[in-house]
Amino acid sequence: MLCASFAKGEGEAVLSKEVIATIVHRLLGGDMLASYDEALRIELLRLATLLIEHVPEQLVDHRKELIKFSWNHLKSEDTQSKQCAYVNVCRFIQVYDTPPKIILQVYVALLRTFQP
């Protein structure tokens, strides 16, 4: 439903600043995060990536929480979760100004992931 709204160009009308703040603080950064199962974490990573892609201006105030959420998943043992986290971090780097040191760290970690 959210993807369809973004495709029609109605994403900003659907997501107010309050809704975005709730998503970031309660779902992506809340105390319950540790109790989520892996499938829910993957879907939250996908949601965060979708938001970064389509409404980056509304997320400017939440950049720290977004990158922290994704960065924690880069260390995950679950391959799918780790790959979703890499996609998320790459979208973050694409949309927001990111220090070159962080970009290099992500790039090196991504290369190491695929070494035999």
Image (cartoon, rainbow, N blue to C red):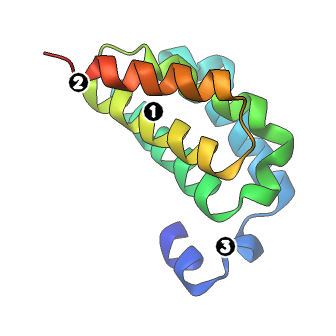
Which secondary structure, mark 3? Answer: helix
Residue 4's spot in the image, x, y percent?
Answer: 49, 77
Identify the disc placed on residue 111: none
User: Helix, strand or loop at disc 2?
Assistant: loop
Name the residue at 65% across, 30% down: 67
Amino acid identity at mark 1? Ala
Q: Nearer the viewer, mark 3 or mark 1?
A: 1
**What residue is pinned by disc 3?**
11
Q: Which residue is mark 1?
A: 85
Residue for badge 2: 114
Q: 31 above or below 7?
A: above
Tell whether 63 sits left or right of 78.
right
Q: Earlier in the sequence, mark 3 or mark 1?
A: 3
- For the residue pair 109 and 7, the one nearer the viewer reads as 109
What's the CA distance linking mark 3 and mark 2? 35 Å
**Earlier-in-chain disc, 2 versus 1:** 1
Residue type at mark 3 is Gly
Q: Residues within 10 Å of mark 3 (few under 14, many from 20)?
A: some
Q: Residue at x 20, y 18 (%)?
A: 115
Q: Who's the residue at 44% across and 42% down the image?
A: 87
Q: Secondary structure at mark 1?
A: helix
